[in-house]
Image (tube, rainbow, N blue to C red):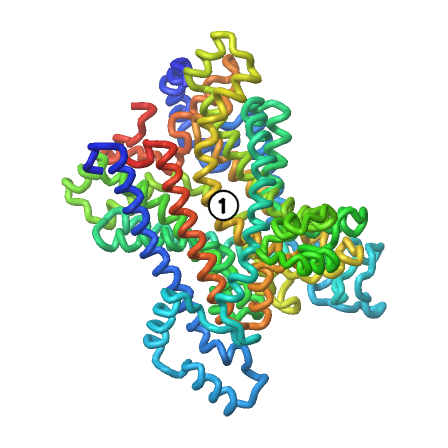
Amino acid sequence: MTSGEITSVGTAGAAPEHVAGRGAWFKKLPVVHQVRQSVGLQRGMLIAGLVLTAVFVLVAVFAPLLAPYGWSQLRDLDGAFGAQQPPSAEHWFGTTVGGYDVLSRVVWGARTALLVVLVAVLSSIVVGVLLGLVSGYFGGWLDRVLVVVADAVYAFPSLLLAILLAIVISGGQSSMWGGILAAALSITVVFVPQYFRVVRAEVVRIKAEAFVDSARVLGTGHWRIMTRHVLRNSTRTLPLIVTLNASEAILTLAGLGFLGFGIEPTAAAEWGYDLQRSLADVTSGIWWTALFPGLAIVLAAMGMTLMGESLNDLADPRLRSRARSGQVAGAVAATAVGATSVEADPVEADPVETPEPKGDDA
Amino acid sequence: MASRSTAGSALGRYVLVRFLLIIPTVFILVTTVFVLMRATGDPITAALGGKLPPDQLAELIHAAGYDRPVIVQYWEYLTGIFSGDFGTTISDNRPVTEILTTYGTATLELAAYAILVALVLGVPFGMVSGYFRDRLPDAVLRILAILAYATPVFFAGLILKLVFSVWLGWFPVAGRVSTGGEITMQLEGAGSGFMLVDAISTGDPEVVLDVLSHAALPAIALGLLTAGVFLRLVRTNMIGTLGTGYIDAARSRGVKESRLVRKHAWRPALIPIITVAGMQVAMLLVGAVLTETTFEWRGLGFQLAEYLQARDFVAVQGIVVLMAVVVAVTNFLVDVLAALIDPRVRY
């Protein structure tokens, strides 16, 4: 890093953010903030990721309007759809070996995937962050045990763990919500150690900071220190992990489905299951049953990976592309200070928290 | 670490501590698997429930000892594992260890090919991508890398199969070797389990070619996934090393750009590859399960999927535990290797 960059980070940086003040609160939202910060290729990747993800979410939400048929519908007024029909005007993506409409199953599959991702990511954040916070803050034997267990689970091949949990939770086959919860919870167990490790590491670092000591001296309780002072400063890397995990969740769900541990075809549409069914089709040259659900997985996972990758690059000063000199210095710098500082920002009014534990701007 | 006396003893200490850490890891894994599998009830009901009358079922359960207290069974399972006994499968009544030795080599072979593909594609393209940072080649390669790891291996496998086997007919659709090749190998008495080794030992180039053409698509499908990860990693590290002072120094001495990348920048950029390659083992095994199913590659993963379909949880348990142990041991070896190469790791 050259000295020139440091200067721009340090001085020009702080001003615009503070001047902009609270009126522009939305500019500080995790992803919005990073879009403004990014330039060139990184911005392109981030926006492409956002668009793909938005399309995925919209398709999932409006599935009932978009899908021409139900996910387990075999016939309409004109009679049965027929099995393995090539794409046609009635069935844009053709029909499967079981006689379902491929397009409808792809569209409805987005809904299943989104539900699984939401449940999995939310529950692993809650559990992982809570455990990491308690473990890192209090330390002691509990901390040591949790670290060893988290490391062991982390080392476990994730899909295998998910398979075992799917067996336990649902006996391997189930209704729509049973299947969604089984898949989501199996994925949760795999993800919890990641959040745990990240948050714990941050908590251990932050609790040694002077502002935590000050709070303690003032008689603040453990719970308040943990939630207000420590937690708010240790969540800065979470958006990144969330996006990468979301794409991993989609792939794990598909993997489970592919091995026959997903959701029953009559209960909900699931892309991995459809791919498993298309294995035999491919050998006889039937491409539409494999191509479309597969592409759906790739696009959904790719959208979130693109987002995660760009967030990762933006959080890492070595990888962050900067606007060439002369190009809106303020916009670039504003971001550099706290890289990620939305959550890391101390609450303005609280004097105890003001000494922000950041190296760059000190 | 306290002792800084000699480099040797520090390394020895590190290796020992790291080795001892495997024990709790493996113990936790084995216990987790056992608890999870038994939480569903006994394996015999799971496998044969509904297929046999209840009294016969109860008899089988009693004979296998699944009606005893769980803690006793757990102890028996643990001691069994340490003496190399992983139990007997329910669906086809074979010792799990036999399955592991029969099919483990196939999975190992596939993983080796995949790593080869990943290195050949990932490392050079990662260097190119890092060198041309934020310019067109970088943009294209990064998008491809992301595409590679956003694509589930089984979908990549299906597409490769569709295009290159079914439409173009360049490669066989599935399996590890054609029947003719298998017979030749059996006649020659080659039975190491590694198809390529066996094929070479027959001395028949046609058999070697046959084995390689069977391996090509699964290796590419599984390798692409890892190649994407490698590319990203090499790129990141290239960017890091290209920004350091000694690169500037070399450049100012007039070292040519191509030589700069090939000789100066890439070595430090490769160290993290070793660590990450180790972490990839877990991903590779999972990928192997899915790839093997796609290509009917008769390895551990293919068997695992078969046993999952048959609800044979003793076999599942055995295969999963073995894979977990392989991952734990690989991680250990990787850490030791990293410590040997980079003294900073030893702390």
Residue B180 position, x and y percent, is 75, 58
Marked residue chain, label 1 = B
Who's the residue at 32% across and 40% down the image?
A202
Asked whether, in this view, residue A184 is left or right of residue B151, the answer is: left
Q: In this view, does A40 lie above or below A121?
A: above
**Callout 1: 10 Å neighbours few (<14), some, many (20+)?**
many
Who's the residue at 74% across and 64% down the image?
A100
Quadrant position of residue A359: top left
Q: Nearer the viewer, residue A126 or B175?
A: B175
Quadrant position of residue A213: top left
Q: In this view, does A48 lie above or below A139?
A: above
Q: In this view, does A18 lie above or below A12?
A: below
Asked whether, in this view, residue B299 is left or right of residue B13, the answer is: right
Residue A163 position, x and y percent, is 51, 62
Asked whether residue A181 appears in the rendered view, the answer is no
Q: What's the residue type where badge 1 is placed?
A: Gln
Q: How many marks?
A: 1
Where does label 1 land, which residue? Answer: B280
Q: Which of A355 and A147 is in front in this view?
A: A147
* Residue closest to the far bottom: B55
Quadrant position of residue A209: top left
Q: Which of A192 and A324 is in front in this view?
A: A192
Who's the residue at 48% across and 50% down the image?
B282
